[in-house]
Amino acid sequence: MRTHVTVAVVGAGVIGSIIVKAIAKRKPGWTVIGTGRSESTLKKVAELGGKPVRDNRAAVEQSDLLIIAVKPSQLINVVSEIADLVNGKIVVSVVAAAPISWLMRALPGARVVRAMLNIAADVGKSFTALSAMPGLDEEARSLVEETFSTLGHVEWVEESYMNALTALSGSAPAFLAEIIDALALGGIAAGLPRDLAYRATLHAMMGTASLLLERGWSPHQVRDLVITPAGTTIRGVMVLQGNGLKRTIMEAVLEAARRADEMQAELFQMK
């Protein structure tokens, strides 16, 4: 555990500000810099416990660990701006679809890691996938893992999985929010007050996830424990299966993965 590290988050937008907040909250001895162009962004960084800096180059120069959290369309300009400052630095990109090979060419001499987190990081519950450049040293790996552990669960994975994880883990909160909304609306249709329907749905969702994680069960085991012959649940499952729920969700993940592949080709493959 390191007592002091300076982390620079270039791009303190939605995800960048969540990272600033998590590090400031869970690593009180560390310094976390957040960059932004607008006064509102810089003000938010300060409110979250970070050090607001307008100049990306100044932030990079001060950092031990650099996290790039800009939009994919902005990445090319940002790396061009800071490329001469990153030799030997640990650089983590949380930019969707940006491959390590491209980052290594654009940021010569940097120790590069690619990360994919999700918005649940805002409450310390992200699933964050990390993938490292070939030959990354253990010191860099350790610091990156310690940093991103402030956001939730961390796993190192092969880079070939990253676009699929962008579609699954990165997009899952939006997909699950749609499912939660549908379940709650069903409860309302059955006569429940709105607030009660949403509380019941959210606790069922959290409880089911905890059950699966802690027991190590598969989803069908939970389903089979709930279903009883000629009961209420099997009637509902028949409707879900008849309307193609599983196929629809699978296709949503596949479509998001295809879009990640398209973005990689459009923005980075030929640059």
Image: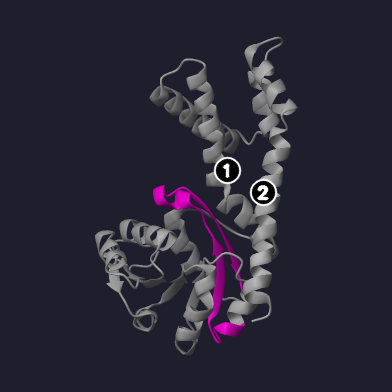
Which of the two residues, 115 or 45, is positioned nearer the viewer here?
Answer: 45
Q: Is residue 56 left or right of residue 186?
A: left
Q: Is residue 84 visible?
A: yes
Please name the residue shown 52% across and 65% down the image: 94
Image quarter for residue 24? bottom left
Label 2 crowd bin: few (<14), some (14–19), many (20+), radius 10 Å: many
Please name the residue shown 70% across and 43% down the image: 250
Q: Which mark is residue 155?
A: none
User: What amino acid is at disc 1?
Assistant: Phe
Q: Is residue 227 left or right of residue 175?
A: right
Q: Is residue 115 magenta?
A: yes
**Coordinates of residue 82 in the picture (x, y in percent):** 45, 84
Task: Check whether the beta carbons of the residues at disc 1 and disc 2 lie within 8 A of each other.
Answer: yes
Please name the residue shown 46% across and 57% down the image: 149
Q: Is residue 173 above or below residue 224?
A: below
What residue is pinned by disc 2?
253
Q: Earlier in the sequence, mark 1 or mark 2?
A: 1
What residue is pinned by disc 1?
175
Which of the two residues, 4 or 211, is positioned nearer the viewer here?
Answer: 211
Q: Is residue 96 above or below residue 109?
A: above
Helix, strand or loop at label 2? It is helix
User: What amino acid is at disc 2?
Assistant: Val
**Coordinates of residue 77 in the picture (x, y in percent):** 49, 80
Specify the segment rendered in magenta.
105-134
Q: Is residue 194 above or below residue 19?
A: above
**Coordinates of residue 35 in the picture (x, y in percent):** 35, 72
Q: Is residue 174 magenta?
A: no
